[in-house]
Amino acid sequence: RDGFSSIRAGYNLAQNLTQQYGSMHFYVSPPMNLTVDKSLTKQLNQNLWSEERQYRLSDSTSFDEGGAIYVQKVHLAPEPNLLLGTHSSQLELLKRTLPKFLSTVQSSSFLKRFQSNVKQQKLLIQGEPCLANDFQALVDTRGNFFQLDLDRCFVPGTSVKQNITNEELSECLQAINSIEKQVKKALSRHKIR
């Protein structure tokens, strides 16, 4: 199936979440379908490895040599940042990256904003349960959350929202609570400049 429909639906969802909840994301414009040459395809495949985070950004994605790809104009993510997610690999990544990230936090208001945004994420998930499917967000040093990969809400290749069970929803909310506790605990041991 063509993945463009779910990517486009993810962009539209981002716009709706911003309007309804004030949620932040990095999307600037709708996705486009482009044809690229072999040299660009090779570079894109090399970029799937994150040297800093020491993991492959996608286990299932690779780009065919020369062909169609989907691109989307986005704002650059603030640096430094903290990637949050409820998948086991993202929880492991959080353990490794949290201390370094917190060493860059300079504002005593970080925790207050972080906790406020955790509450917002929970409201988002309750209002749009599909967000519980592989929940992902990025946090900046001020405690702001940015939604990531919103096409995860849709059946791949379609604009049909994923069905999320009450159990999956509950597990996601519990994981977010656990992340919040982990950040609070690590922050209590760390002195903010």
Image (cartoon, rainbow, N blue to C red):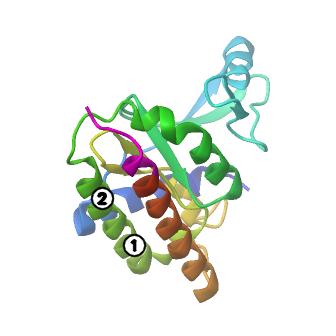
Between the C-alphas of marks 2 and 1, the distance is 12 Å
Report the disc number at residue 23. 2
Q: For residue 123, what is the image quadrant?
A: bottom left
Figure check: 52 above or below 109: above
On the question of residue 161 being in view, the answer is no
The stretch drawn in magenta includes residue 191? yes
2 and 1 marks in contact (CB < 8 Å): no
Q: Which residue sits at x=70%, y=57%? A: 88
Image coords of residue 192 (percent x, y): 29, 37
Q: Which residue sits at x=74%, y=22%? A: 66
Q: Which residues are magenta?
A: 186-193
Residue type, numbered disc 1: Lys
Tag in front: 2 or 1:
1
Question: What residue is disc 1 on?
Answer: 122
The stretch drawn in magenta includes residue 117? no
Report the magenta stretch's main SS.
Answer: loop
Residue type, numbered disc 2: Ser
Q: Which residue sits at x=36%, y=48%? A: 25
Figure check: 15 above or below 177: above
Mark 2 neighbour class, 10 Å CA radius: few under 14, some 14 to 19, many 20 or more: some
Report the disc number at residue 75. none
Mark 1 neighbour class, 10 Å CA radius: few under 14, some 14 to 19, many 20 or more: many
Task: Say which element carries label 1.
Answer: helix
* Towards the viewer: 144 or 45: 144
Image coords of residue 85 (percent x, y): 56, 55
Image coords of residue 54 (percent x, y): 70, 29
Q: Earlier in the sequence, mark 2 or mark 1?
A: 2
Image quarter of the N terminus: bottom right
Q: For residue 127, what is the image quadrant?
A: bottom left
Horizontal side, residue 140 vs residue 165: left or right: left
Task: Say which element carries label 2.
Answer: loop
